[in-house]
Amino acid sequence: MARARKQKIKRGAILFAHNSPKYNYFSMAVYAARRINHYLDLPVTVITDEESVAKTDYSFDNIVITTPDKNNKRDWGMWINKGRYQAYDFSPYDETLLLDTDYVVNSDKLLKTFDISQDFCCHDRTEYFMQPNLPLEVLSAYSFKTLWATAVMFKKTNKTEQIFRCLEMVQKNYDHYANIHGFISGTFRNDYALTLALRLVNGHMNDPENIIPWNLLHIGRNTSVYPENSDPLTNKFVVLYDHWNRGKIKKEYLTIKDIDFHVMNKDNFMEII
Amino acid sequence: MDTKTLLAETKARFSHNAAKAYLKEKYDGKFLIAEQGGLWRAEPNIISFLNSGKSKTVILQDTFNNPVKVDRKSLSAKLQETYDNVMEEWYKEWQELESKR
């Protein structure tokens, strides 16, 4: 009788970390990787470049060196965020979490995403700490609700490969899609490219199985976050908010624990790592 | 600067409304479980429905609106366990929050 041997599925996380003149994304990746190891028990591969990679006492599962596309700008300067479509080819894992380096893993919640979809899933809804009921972001007034590339789970399947190939196509023709959907193409955003690519692959609609069924939580405008103690793996943070009222700021705060979040303010993030 | 000093110096006020919203966000996704080929949300409605039947199996729509044939008792037990555990944790944290008033 033939013995069937079940091959173990390899799971891991990958992070893209290309330093800009203003921010050290490699340091952010080291901080994020330690937390991914601790809370999700997953190995981490970093996609970086010769200029960004630095000596560290942290040992990544893999370090992939690439040539970054530096042709993108934000209000604060150069922003190297293109090439996310390469995640499919660079990931050494069967099932991968693709996370932004400024996403703070603080619980094991993301492990559930492996059970949610057979192919690919990402967030389509967001909430901001201290600022409930902010409207969801849209590509433009006449276009779709934005999907978020901040935290993505994918498995190596044909459909997933199509999504990443489509992401590459959208990146390479970003001006064209910006023109069609009425958004400004000056700054390339992975969120917008993903929104378009996923809809294209799903026949111009969203498949609920590609959506993570809980909100992506942001530390947004006028809000900052600080660890409650000096433990680099602490799960307790304080969120501080500048509540503007009649021209005056009233500070408000909240203590949080065991909950993942995305820090939009990079200056604040550099302070906490 | 540690957070206690930071909060004291900025005279920041604890926001109960934000804390309540944060707890909802935190526990919302924890009710989800993948079981018997579907994705389920452990809620009183579905648990009551499962407990009200007598047949061994039942066909239900999961959270993706796919019809899934499930073992009634086994799914009910799993959902009940998830619901109880998550609500217990949520309630505990909610009480801690209320004590700050």
Image (tube, coloured by chain):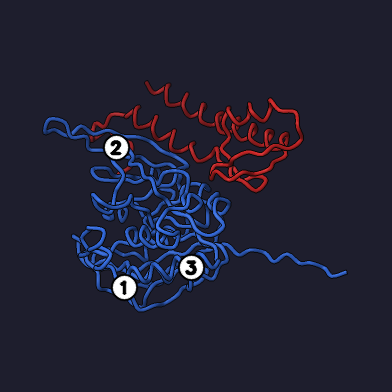
Chain colours: A blue, B red
| Callouts 1 and 2 close, C-beta under 8 Å | no
Circles 3 and 2, Cβ within 8 Å, touching? The answer is no
Query: Which residue position holds label 1?
Result: A172
- Residue sticking out furthest to the right: A1
Q: Amino acid at mark 1?
A: Lys
Q: Nearer the viewer, mark 1 or mark 2?
A: 1
Q: Quadrant of the N terminus of chain A?
A: bottom right
Q: Mark 3 or mark 2, which has the lower sequence index?
A: 3
Quickly name the residue at label 2: A131
Q: Position of residue A270 (x, y in %)?
A: 31, 56
In this rendering, would B61 be left or right of A251?
right
Nearer the viewer's eye, disc 3 or disc 1? 1
The relative height of residue A196 versus residue A146 in the rendered view (above or below) is below
Looking at the rendered structure, the kind of residue marked 2 is: Gln
Q: Provide residue A198's location: percent of width, then percent of height.
A: 41, 60
Residue B2 x %, y %: 33, 42
Above or below, A243 against A54 in this view is: above
Lower sequence index among marks 3 and 1: 3
For badge 3, the amino acid type reads Thr
Which chain hosts label 2? A
The percent position of residue B96, horizontal first and vertical second, equals 46, 26
- Which residue is disc 3 drawn over? A45
Q: Secondary structure at mark 1?
A: helix
Q: Residues within 10 Å of mark 2 (few under 14, many from 20)?
A: some
